[in-house]
Amino acid sequence: MEIKFPNIPLYQGWGAPLRVESDLRDLELIHGQVPEDLNGTLYRCGPDRQYPPMHGDDIFIDGEGMAHMFRFTNGHVDYRSRWVRSERFLLQEQARRSLFGRYRNRYTNDPSVAGRNQGTANTNAIWHGRKLLILKEDSLPVEVHPDTLETIGPWDYQGAVKAVSLSAHPKVDLHRNELLTYSYQATGDGSTDIVFYIMDAEGKVTQELWFNMPYPGMVHDFAVTDTHVIFPFWPVITDMTVVRNGGPYYQWHPDKECHFAIFPRRGKAEDIRWFRGPAASAGHMMNAFNEGARLHLDVCLYQGNCFEFFPSYDGSPYRPCPPQLTRLSFDLDQNRTDYASRILLPTPSEMPRIDERYIGKTYRYGYMLCRSPDAAAAGTIGLSAIGCIDHETGALTTWSPGPDSGVQEPIFVPRQIGAAEGDGYLLVLVNRMPENRSDLAVLDARSIADGPVALLKLSLRVRSTFHGMWVPGQALQTGIYNV
Ligand code: V55
Ligand code: FE
């Protein structure tokens, strides 16, 4: 059977399937100097396409996972990429074709893979509990080797995780060396079960709280404060009747409300407080923190449906709405169920990150993709700049790699153990679209507008990735983070 990808925009230009595993020792330096104090590894993960899809209407969040690493040692930077050899990948490799159908819809899979794991392992890479884990929210983590990216296998915390999946957006508490994570639709497709877990530095489950969601929604990300956990439920909902008929796994329900569950990190089901508000949606949270009895959630919020490819259940047309960094504030000492909402930044922004030593704490700096001044002139959303918001002044500073280039989610690296908040670097993959290849930019996080302190060249394209993490060399050796 011939290998031919459908002629759709998704697979053209920068999105063309790459399907290549690479090793590139010693990236070329375009300009600047790689900081000598930057020792460790940037891990990232994104989708590629192993084989042409079974259905023509593929969506970009559904390719097979490719893991990437950039290892920094004493000024040298080495790059490597490997497919994540999930059960799905291995089955398809054997068959030399796609066997899994539409995104998360097992009713569209080839009958030969009934009951097999359809997880793509394409969303995030995190290092915790002495393991490098590749994550996809519909399945359990896949462990890969932190030096080689060779796949080791699925990881269920020695059977302690009974949920069928774990989120791709866990939070690592670097101070306590704990992982805070969860599973939604945790007992199977369309279920309303959700479970919150805390794992210790050795990967032992030390907290587990099961409860029910208001509807079987998508819970792509959540947030934690030093004391609490907040789960947002946006009305992007699974209807199993639709799924069984081969339809989309999620549909937008503009007539349903958002719900938020807030409880103490070590709380019980009776501690859960619920809040509600008008329909909106989001992929990603920047951070959350406590201020007295109030909990603030900073989120890149869409005033409508954030997924064009998950249509409205009632056939109403998709209305584009740019993501805006918004602070939702919840009073925990009163009996109200509503919350306050304030836009922190009107400029569209997404893929928010912070200095992760400040997860759950009052924090000053946020980093994200944002609309570049160039794109603003062209009238597109064009999230082609890196932004840094200073919550103390409200000021936004940006760096754009040029009008024909794109950027991927920035990752913050502290300059050294004990550095002040925001004192460090941002690592940014730059998409050089006209040249069909990538750069890796190292920015000084305190002055991103000055441009990279080091710009490294790859002779190849690093297809768009979603998320990742910096792991200090010292942490890989000792097994724990030291901040
Ligand atoms: C998202 C991404 C996913 C997914 C569900 O950005 C939601 C949201 C990368 O995969 O499966
Ligand atoms: Fe995400």
Image (cartoon, helix red, strand yellow):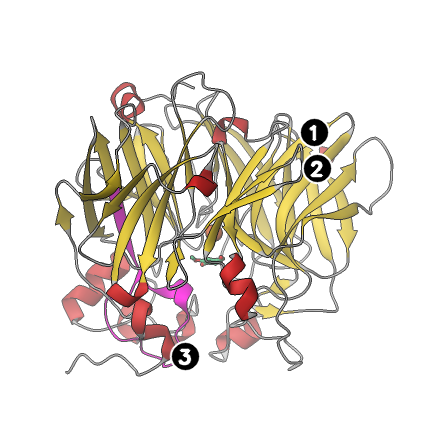
Place of residue 109 in the rendered image (x, y in percent of width and height, measured from the top left): 35, 73
Q: Secondary structure at mark 1?
A: strand
Residue 52 lies in the magenta-colored region: yes
Place of residue 69 in the rendered image (x, y in percent of width and height, measured from the top left): 25, 43
Sequence-earlier tag: 2 or 1: 1
In the image, 16 versus 154, the foreground residue is 16
Mark sitting on residue 296: 2
Q: Is residue 388 visible?
A: yes
Sequence-earlier tag: 3 or 1: 3
User: In the rendered structure, which amino acid carries the disc numbered 2?
Assistant: His
| Residue positioned 50% across, 77% down in the render | 247
Mark sitting on residue 57: 3
Q: CA distance from mark 3 to mark 1?
A: 43 Å
Relative to residue 112, is residue 450 depicted above or below? Answer: above
Relative to residue 207, is residue 443 depicted above or below? Answer: below
Q: Are marks 2 and 1 in contact (CB under 8 Å)?
A: yes
Q: Is residue 39 left or right of residue 298?
A: left
User: In the rendered structure, which amino acid carries the disc numbered 1?
Assistant: Asn
